[in-house]
Image (tube, helix red, strand yellow):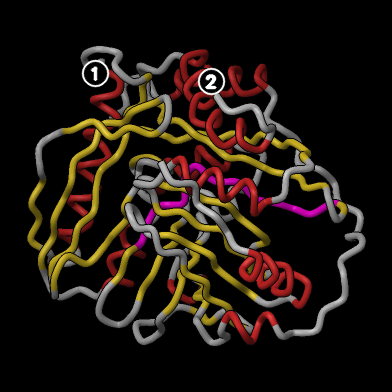
Amino acid sequence: MDKIVINNEVRTAVRNSVASGLSFALFMLPNEDGMQFYACKTPTRANSDVSGFVIASFNSEDASNTLVITDELSLESVLNIPVKSITSTEEYTLPQSTDRDDYLRNLTSLIASLEGKDAKVVISKVLSTVSDRNPLDVAEEYFTLLTSCMRALYYTPETGMWIVATPEVLIETETAGRYHTMSLAGTRKVGSGPWDKKNRFEHELVTRYIVDTLKSCDMTVEVQPDENLRFGPVEHLCNHIFATGTSSPLVLAQALSPTPAVCGWPVDFAKSKIAEFESHSRECYGGFIGLMNAKSCRLYVNLRSCKVTQLTPNRHCYTLFAGGGINSMSNPMSEWDETEAKLSTLLGIITNNPS
């Protein structure tokens, strides 16, 4: 495996962007070697005519809350911006990591409330750690390890800096009027044998929601057979889904997000439970990122990600997010272990202790 290298010019452009309050996205599409750099003075609010790198938070209810980083500024122009060295940042309160006992207690209550309900709720947790590892070095290793994912390091003054490597397609253009997405749910260690009833039930809810949502947008839908999709030490149940029709990429993305894989089902019910049981803001986690223009899109659910906050020139706080689908058959301790496995790859890189 060839190591992804972020060269000195790009590293300087990233530093200049942050120091100058510019927005940027450094990203690699799945299974592609080329690294792209977009930068602009101010992100644009998404609409059907805007092209660029798209960022939607978990709670982006419509396109007006979705940001687009255009390629307004070239790499060379960002390199030539005169900036002062960043010597310190304002006082910063470290986000509190989710306490295991609180998490288990909340899940126990949630599972009891789901008894007899045809429902799923995704409950996430956060893990905050301080490291002297540079975000660009973390991104290099993460991007190298997960070549089949959409990989991105991005920053806007509104969102802060994020590192992402996500395997989950939200919506992407196949040909004119034909789109691809996937239902991705259920989690287990790689090679664990047949999928159990709990994970299959969770996955079927996701698939049903996506199909129904696409049909509500007047799309014709085709669901491919089940397969397993690996991500580091875990794998997920996956169905590739194809849709044909005249709806725009942005309309489909907003209709599908947040998916049951990161929110739950029914969506409004799941959101109310998330508000009840989660004490942190998800921010960009669970939203979506990717490329979009008037005719096509490649958009991905923002999973396996962390927010990065600079504390001093050489120290950063990394806040990692992970979640799991909860239904009436869930086991709280198993769900905690699942989120630990999902965090392990990125956390190992940040702490320089790969799993």
Is 172 contained in the magenta span? no
Q: Which residue is at the front of the view, 276 or 254? A: 254
Rendering coords of residue 97 (x, y %) = 71, 32
Say which residue label 1 marks.
195
Q: Residue at x 78, y 47 (%)?
A: 316
Q: Amino acid at mark 2?
A: Trp
What's the distance in space between the residues labelled 2 and 1, CA to CA? Answer: 19 Å
Q: Residue at x 71, y 37 (%)?
A: 128
Q: Residues within 10 Å of mark 1 (few under 14, many from 20)?
A: few
Q: Which secondary structure is most common in the magenta stretch? A: strand
Rendering coords of residue 134 (x, y %) = 72, 50
Q: Residues within 10 Å of mark 2 (few under 14, many from 20)?
A: many
Residue span colored magenta: 299-311
Q: Amino acid at mark 1?
A: Trp
Classify residue 76 by image quadrant: bottom right
Rendering coords of residue 15 (x, y %) = 73, 68
In the image, 249: left or right of 5? left
Tag on residue 336?
Answer: 2
